[in-house]
Amino acid sequence: MKKSGFMVLVLIMVSNSLDQTKIPAPASDPLDWQILVDGKPIVTPFELASIWINRQMDEPSFAEITLFLDRNKITDPHFYVFDKEIHILLGYHHSLQTVFQGRMVVHQIVDHPDEPLSSIVHCEGPLQLAEFSAVDSAPELDLTYGTSILEFDLSFHGKGELEGMIIFPGTVSGSLGKKIKLNGLPSGFNKEVIIRGVEQLFNENEWRTMIHVNSFMP
């Protein structure tokens, strides 16, 4: 993943006063996933390594599904078909929601020393167009450092503009063009910002959502 150039070092007091019901507590719920091909769940003997989903404003969405293969019995998973529609669903406690819909565009196989033999499915989805929030609309998410915000990399500019990224426990919430509210940061960073991009970083032990933001409308 490309790391942004924004840097900020802060000392902050944690705020627990806001309702964080849309964001699950880290590692509090068992994770679940499912891949549908033409509407049917795949059944595969291969171990899921990771799922990465990226939606950026005014760009096609894309996803990468990485599976570990058995070197002693290399078998091609049957769902690798280019003309089939693929849905990726993520969730907790078997409560799943679709986070990606598209088609496979590349099938890649990788073997490096001291690393598992991997099969990677690259998928592309539709162009991501955003409907921007009205100025007076309520934020879609309220995020607080120390409770829901796990990591951040933010820059606050002299003109009052804020941009960067925030990572928090995995959720399907976070619509392109909608607003989120940041809390628990130094005063210049505690403000409403616009969602410009959303990434889902998933494996069977962890699900994180990364949101790319700025504070100005187009």
Image (spheres, rainbow, N blue to C red):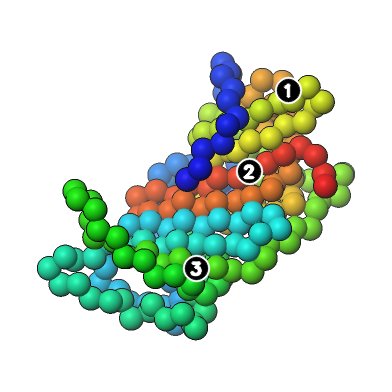
Seen as rendered, the residue at the extreme left is 72
The residue that disc 2 covers is 212
From the top left corner, tell me how far across and down residue 152 is, in percent.
Answer: 56, 33
Viewer-nearest residue: 76 or 88: 76
Seen as rendered, the residue at the extreme top is 11
Amino acid carrying label 1: it is: Gly
Amino acid carrying label 2: it is: His
The answer to whether 205 is drawn above or below residue 123 in the figure is above
Judged left or right of residue 25, residue 128 is: right
From the top left corner, tell me how far across and down residue 122 is, in percent.
Answer: 45, 66
The answer to whether 28 is drawn above or below residue 183 in the figure is below
Judged left or right of residue 205, residue 53 is: right
Q: Earlier in the sequence, mark 3 or mark 1?
A: 3
Mark pair 3, 1: CA separation:
39 Å
Residue 207 numbered mark, or none: none
Mark pair 1, 2: CA separation:
18 Å
The residue that disc 3 covers is 123
Viewer-nearest residue: 88 or 92: 88
Q: Residue at x 41, y 67 (%)?
A: 121
Badge 1 crowding class, 10 Å Cα cut-off, few under 14, some 14 to 19, many 20 or more, is few
Q: Earlier in the sequence, mark 1 or mark 2?
A: 1
Please name which of the two marks, 3 or 1, marks the residue nearer to the observer.
Answer: 3
Q: Earlier in the sequence, mark 3 or mark 2?
A: 3
Badge 2 crowding class, 10 Å Cα cut-off, few under 14, some 14 to 19, many 20 or more, is many
From the top left corner, tell me how far across and down residue 84 is, in percent.
Answer: 49, 82
Viewer-nearest residue: 65 or 34: 65
Labels 3 and 1 touching (C-beta < 8 A): no
Amino acid carrying label 3: it is: Cys
Residue 188 numbered mark, or none: 1
From the top left corner, tell me how far across and down residue 160 is, in percent.
Answer: 80, 26
Judged left or right of residue 194, residue 61 is: left
| Camera sees residue 18 | no
